Amino acid sequence: MGVCECPAWLWLLLSLLWLPLGLPVLGAPLHLICDSGVLERYVLEGKEAENVTMGCAESCSLNENITVPDTKVNFYAWKKMEFGQQAVDIWQGLTLLSEAVLRGQALLANSSQPREPLQLHMDRAVSGLRSLTTLLRALGAQKEATSPPDAAPSAVPLQTITADTFSKLFQVYSNFIRGKLKLYAGEACRTEDR
Ligand SMILES: *[C@@H]1O[C@H](CO)[C@@H](O)[C@H](O)[C@H]1NC(C)=O
Ligand SMILES: *[C@@H]1O[C@H](CO)[C@@H](O)[C@H](O)[C@H]1NC(C)=O
Ligand SMILES: *[C@@H]1O[C@H](CO)[C@@H](O)[C@H](O)[C@H]1NC(C)=O
C-alpha cells in the first residue's frame, strides 16, 4: 500500500508545516499524528482561541446556528464500536467541523467589526483542520469511512449540537481533538504498529 496519493504540493505544504516543530519531515508522515505532541499543539491552539473569545457573549455571536459534532464521549459506547465505525464517526465529525469553521470564517470576514485576534485564531483553526484531515487520511480513516456499504460497518448516526458563538465553535474544535480524535488516533496508531 502506498503511503498516500497526495500531490507533491501537499507534501511541500506538510513539510513547511512541520519544519517549525522540528519533526522528521521525510520520515513517516503516517506517524505524525501518532506523535501526541502534534495533536496537543492543535488542542492548545483551540484553547488559546477559546480564551480570546471568553467573556464576549454578545459580540462573539455568529448570528446563526451552525451545526457541529457533539464532542461528548461516552467511553463505554465508544469502546463497543468497531474500529471501522469509529473511523466513520471521526471522519464525519471532522468533515462537519471543517464546514462549520469555514462558515465561521466566512461570517467573520463579512462582519463589520474589527476582529483581528479572532481572525488569526479562525485562520489557524481552518489550517489546523486541513492538516488533521490530511493526517487522518494518511492513517486510512477516510478509506475506512468510505468503503462499500455492504463491507462498511453499520454507521452510527453522527451526534450533533449547534454553535451560535465563536467561543462555542472554538470550544468544540479543541474538545473534538482532545476527545474522540485522540482516542481514535491512539487506536489507529497501535494498529499501525502491529
Ligand atoms: C487561558 O487563560 C487563563 C486565564 O487567563 C490562563 O491561565 C491560561 O493559561 C490560558 N490558556 C491558554 C491555553 O492560553
Ligand atoms: C438558534 O436556535 C435557537 C434554539 O433553537 C433559536 O432560539 C435561535 O433563534 C436560533 N438563532 C438563530 C440566529 O437562528
Ligand atoms: C455577507 O454580507 C452580504 C451583504 O450583507 C450578504 O449578502 C452575504 O450573504 C453575506 N455572506 C455571508 C457568508 O454571510
Image (spheres, rainbow, N blue to C red):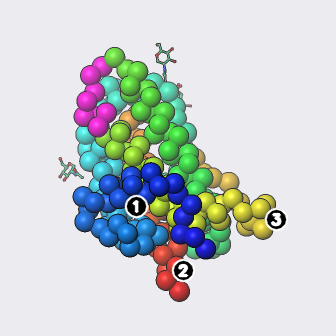
Is residue 46 shown above or below 24? above
Residue drawn at point x = 35 percent, y = 59 percent = 15
Residue drawn at point x = 38 percent, y = 73 percent = 27
Q: Nearer the viewer, residue 63 or 111?
A: 111
Main secondary structure along the magenta-highlighted residues: helix
Check contact, mark 1 vs mark 3: CB within 8 A.
no
Residue 29, horizontal then vertical, whole percent = 43, 68
Q: Amino acid at mark 2?
A: Thr
Q: Nearer the viewer, residue 5 or 156?
A: 5
Q: Which mark is residue 178?
A: 1
Q: Is residue 85 left or right of residue 62?
A: right
Provide the residue span drawn in magenta: 113-120
Most extreme residue toward the right, as rendered? 150
Give the residue pinned by disc 2.
191
Q: Amino acid at mark 1?
A: Arg
Q: Quadrant of residue 49?
A: top left
Give the residue pinned by disc 3.
150
Is residue 162 shown above or below 134? above
Residue 122, horizontal then vertical, whole percent = 35, 38
Q: Secondary structure at mark 1?
A: helix
Residue drawn at point x = 40 percent, y = 21 percent = 110
Disc with the residue nearer the chain's start (1 vs 3): 3
